[in-house]
Image (tube, rainbow, N blue to C red):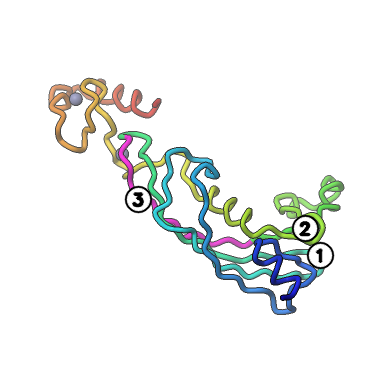
Amino acid sequence: MTYLKILERNMIIDADRLPKEGLKISKDFEFFSEALVEENVVFLQPVHSELTISKVGEEILIKGKITTRLSFVCSRCLVPFEFPVDSRFDLVYLPEELDAIKDQLEDDDLNKMYYSGSKVNIEAIVLEQLNLVFPTKPLCSEDCQGICPVCGKVIQSGECACETKSSDPRLEKLKTFIRDKR
Ligand SMILES: [Zn+2]
Ligand SMILES: [Zn+2]
């Protein structure tokens, strides 16, 4: 088994040993929910990734896509809902040495990421990209009515009768305000 193959098993790629045309990887990852920035997330299936890694000059280029299905908890009504992920990315990594002279780099280079040595950890990159697609406030639907501030029931389920009493638009506004502060 070659050195590259052994590294690949651990999902650490040595960029100096890539084939000229780049290395294609197709792999499923199973992450722990604790690795995610968002709380109360449940994986409904493993994260599938398709990546192409190549080195051009000193730059490591990683093109790829990740797909999976997650279960989120709505930030308004607190009901779990399914969140499909189908995300593409196109990353450029520069050698770490350049990080030290950042000030002298062109603006265009500032948003780029850096690698040390010649190793790239695929698993870490997939996890990072997954975390990036998460909404700051997950919602089961854009017009989710959330929870009734009076009775505490989910308004959408129709179980709550309180809403009919509050036809005053000023009160409606206040309700939305309270909801969004949660
Ligand atoms: Zn909701
Ligand atoms: Zn109510």
Identify the residue at image location x=75%, y=69%.
Answer: 55
Q: Which mark is residue 82?
A: 3
Q: Is residue 94 above or below residue 145?
A: below
Q: Amino acid at mark 2?
A: Leu
Graded by Cα atoms within 10 Å as few (under 14), some (14 to 19) or many (20 or more), the crowding at tag 2 reads some
Q: Which residues are magenta?
A: 78-90
Magenta stretch contains residue 26: no
Q: Tell which circle, 2 or 1, labels the residue nearer the N-terminal end.
A: 1
- Toward which corner of the image does residue 158 lie, by quadrant? top left
Q: Position of residue 15 (x, y in %)?
A: 76, 67
Left or right of 96: which side holds 142?
A: left
Graded by Cα atoms within 10 Å as few (under 14), some (14 to 19) or many (20 or more), the crowding at tag 1 reads few
Q: Evaluate if marks 3 and 2 touch, with contact meaning CB atoms under 8 Å apart.
A: no
Identify the residue at image location x=39%, y=26%.
Answer: 182
Say which residue label 1 marks: 58
Q: Is residue 157 above or below residue 148?
A: below
Decide which of 26, 30 is in the foreground and name it. Answer: 30
Q: Position of residue 134 (x, y in %)?
A: 48, 46
Is the residue indicated by label 1 positioned so its CB lies within 8 Å of ligand 1? Answer: no
Q: Secondary structure at mark 1?
A: loop
Q: Tell which circle, 1 or 3, labels the residue nearer the N-terminal end.
A: 1
Q: Is residue 135 above or below residue 168?
A: below
Left or right of 139: which side holds 113?
A: right
Q: Amino acid at mark 1?
A: Glu
Measure how far apart labels 1 and 3 are at the Cα level.
41 Å
Say which residue label 2 marks: 94
Q: Evaluate if marks 2 and 1 touch, with contact meaning CB atoms under 8 Å apart.
A: yes
The quadrant of the rendered image in which ligand 1 is seen is top left
Q: Tell which circle, 3 or 2, labels the residue nearer the N-terminal end.
A: 3
